[in-house]
Image: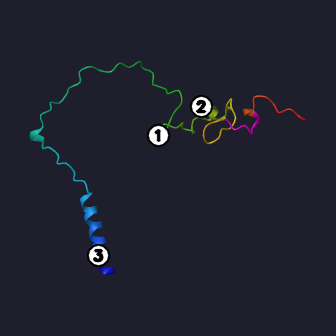
Amino acid sequence: MKKILIATCMMLGLATAASAQKVAPSKPSATTATAKPVIATAKPVTTGKPAVAATPVKADGTPDMRFKANQKAAKTPATAGPKKADGTPDMRYKANQKTPKAKQ
């Protein structure tokens, strides 16, 4: 009985895996293409100066820390202190407290 159950589960698993495969669409041949090539006639205007980004970033959008401009920006302290995981200020830190605690 166990062998039949295992064989049935394996067959169903393989059938599911085989049906989940995507088939790549066939590429149209060059003779059936109907789109005409676009010819660019206007040249882009250049000012002669290379474009400089305010702060260099990596491909994923995070600041690239190899540049001094990004390193200086990271060293400047934030106006607010540490925050909790939910984004609210953590009141255990002095920087987040609005009024200092009164001594009793």
Viewed as shown, does residue 81 lie left or right of 54?
A: right
Quadrant location of the C terminus? top right
Task: Looking at the picture, tell me which residue is in the foreground, 60 or 2.
Answer: 2
Question: Residue furthest toward the front?
Answer: 1
- Position above or below: 45 against 33: above
SS of the residue at dot 2?
A: helix
The percent position of residue 96, horizontal first and vertical second, equals 72, 33
Three-letter amino acid code at the position of disc 3: Ala
CB-based contact (under 8 Å), mark 2 and mark 3: no
Q: Which residue is mark 2?
A: 69
Residue behind mark 3: 7
- Residue found 54% across the figure and 38% down from its top: 64
The residue where tag 1 is placed is 60
State the extent of the magenta-drawn residues as a range: 89-94
Q: Residue at x 26, y 19 (%)?
A: 42
Residue drawn at x 26%, y 57% is: 21
